[in-house]
Amino acid sequence: MGKQKKEKKQKMMKNREAPSRQLTTLKLSHALETIEQRLQCLEDNDCNAEGSRIAKRGVPAILESYKKLLHERRTCCETKQARILFSSMKKQLEDDEALPSASNTTSIRP
């Protein structure tokens, strides 16, 4: 009976999906800011000044791909927001033009 339980548990674990890992723009931004702060703290407080300077120069170079990703996401987001804004403005203008104005309508007086 113990063997069946173990097999059942293994089968359940196999069928369970791994939780999705998403690096949101907010999480990425926060992580990069935190790393910069910690590197500054290291440089300010480490008695091995040369070692902390090397780390302060080397770590950002390693993180450059993440910085580029953050920049691309922010640029894409700004572009998307601008498109939404302009499309809503265009729709509003089209709606305004479709409405008859008071000067264009003729009134019939009895």
Image (tube, helix red, strand yellow):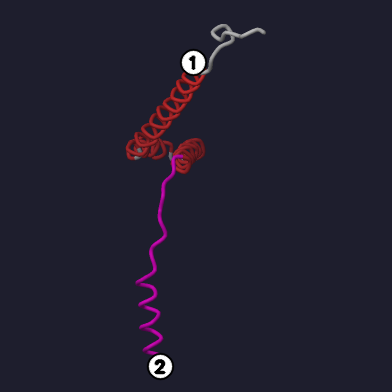
Tell me residue 106's x, y (percent).
57, 8
Q: Judge whether 110 appears above or below 64 on screen.
A: above
| Mark found first going from the N terminus, 2 or 1 | 2
Q: Is residue 102 above or below residue 4?
A: above
Residue located beneath label 2 in the image: 1
What type is the residue that disc 1 sits on?
Glu
Residue farthest toward the front in the current orientation of the protein: 110
In the picture of the structure, the residue carrying the numbered disc 1 is: 97
Is 69 left, or right, of 89 in this rendering?
left
Q: Quadrant of the C terminus?
A: top right
What is the secondary structure assignment of the residue under circle 1? helix
Who's the residue at 39% across and 75% down the image? 12
Pointer 1 local density, CA inside 10 Å: few below 14, some 14–19, many at least 20: few
The residue under the point 54% across, 8% down is 104
Q: Is residue 105 left or right of residue 5?
A: right
Q: Position of residue 28 (x, y in %)?
A: 44, 41
